[in-house]
């Protein structure tokens, strides 16, 4: 498989703040990250709260720039946000005044499609996320899971090279989350997109990822990348009940546990 995204020696710092009693020094959010994500791969990033997962995704999206290092997409250094990278956030970020169809067609204009083409593409992706017949509903008429499906359809409609997802199912109830996880695997298999998915959920990481990168507590570094062969199985199967699922789950849990403990100890020292 060819490399789709190459992250080389990437560090991101934020400027210090002046507090009441002291000046807080420059803060390193992610530190010397090196990762190669393959074309068509489902790549998951997990890490303790505040370790820099979203910062890393913002860097990939071009929403912020690294202080050092380089990120390449198909061999070309990133220069900012572009339609070659779609992003889905935890909050649905749909326009409340537009219908589901309007939300998905919005922006396709930038790609130079005619109105007829925009509607045709939007219908295709609304169907892909299983919402045929809901095209004319407004966001307030859709459930949380449906809104997130529309957000996924909107990102995919641009036909991005990479779909980036920042805890997209975190706000959903457990049942809807599991349904959407399995549907996302189906969509990934159908479209062959490269997906970079951020989560706090260990089960979600094991279920979805072909590889799972575990980050250290702040400053975020890549602690280990684990290959998970489970998502090659039929996604309609009950993968979570397989003994191997428990083995990978435990491995990631153990790696994360150490980092959460470290983060809590650091917090105690600051207090
Ligand atoms: N714009 C910013 N200015 C200053 N510090 C920031 C900024 N953005 C993020 N940070 C800090 O960088 C660190 C990493 O934040 P980030 O949101 O990337 O972590 P995270 O792993 O996604 O956290 P969570 O899992 O809680 O969402 C945090 O300590 C955060 O406070």
Image (spheres, rainbow, N blue to C red):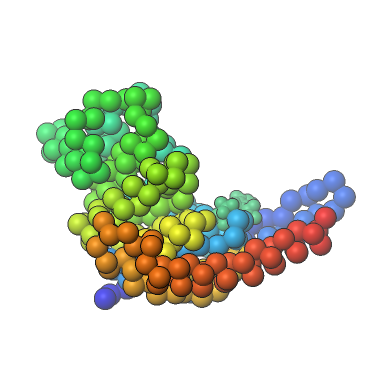
Residue farthest to the right, as pictured:
21
- The reply to whether residue 40 is visible in this rendering is yes
Which residue appears at 23% of the width and 30% of the height?
Answer: 134
Residue 85 locus on image (x, y percent): 34, 54
Residue 139, percent across and down?
Answer: 35, 28
Question: What residue lies at 21% left-to-right and 45% top-to-bottom?
Answer: 128
Quadrant for the C terminus, please: bottom right
- Measured from the top left, where is residue 71 in percent x and y? 43, 67
In the image shown, does 206 or 61 lie closer to the viewer?
206
Q: Is residue 9 left or right of residue 195?
A: right
**Image position of 265 (left or right of 37):** right
> At 85% from the left edge and 46% from the top edge, which residue is drawn?
20
Q: Is residue 55 above or below residue 130?
A: below
The N terminus - image quarter: bottom left
Q: Position of residue 150 (x, y in %)?
A: 31, 38
Above or below, 85 relative to 71: above
**Residue 59 visible here:** no
Query: Does 14 sit left or right of 214 as displayed?
Result: right
Identify the residue at image location x=59%, y=60%: 48
How many numbered markers are drawn?
0
């Amino acid at each position: 498989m060819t490399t789709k995204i190459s992250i080389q020696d990437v560090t991101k710092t934020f400027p210090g703040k002046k507090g009441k009693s002291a000046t807080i020094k420059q803060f390193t959010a992610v530190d010397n990250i090196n990762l190669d994500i393959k074309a068509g791969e489902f790549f998951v990033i997990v890490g303790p709260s505040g370790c820099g997962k979203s910062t890393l995704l913002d860097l990939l999206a071009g929403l912020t720039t690294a202080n050092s290092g380089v990120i390449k997409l198909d061999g070309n250094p990133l220069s900012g946000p572009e339609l070659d990278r779609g992003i889905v956030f935890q909050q649905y970020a749909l326009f409340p005044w537009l219908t589901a169809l309007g939300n998905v067609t919005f922006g396709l204009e930038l790609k130079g499609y005619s109105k007829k083409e925009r509607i045709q593409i939007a219908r295709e992706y609304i169907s892909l996320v299983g919402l045929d017949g809901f095209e004319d509903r407004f966001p307030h008429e859709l459930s949380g899971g449906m809104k997130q499906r529309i957000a996924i359809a909107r990102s995919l409609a641009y036909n991005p090279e990479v779909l980036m997802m920042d805890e997209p199912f975190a706000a959903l109830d457990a049942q809807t989350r599991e349904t959407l996880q399995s549907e996302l695997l189906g969509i990934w298999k159908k479209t062959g997109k490269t997906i970079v998915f951020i989560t706090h959920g260990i089960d979600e990481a094991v279920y979805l990822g072909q590889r799972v990168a575990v980050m250290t507590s702040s400053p975020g570094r890549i602690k280990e990348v684990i290959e998970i062969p489970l998502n090659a199985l039929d996604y309609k199967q009950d993968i979570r009940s397989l003994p191997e699922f428990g083995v990978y789950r435990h491995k990631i849990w153990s790696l994360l546990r150490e980092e959460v403990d470290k983060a809590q100890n650091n917090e105690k020292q600051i207090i």
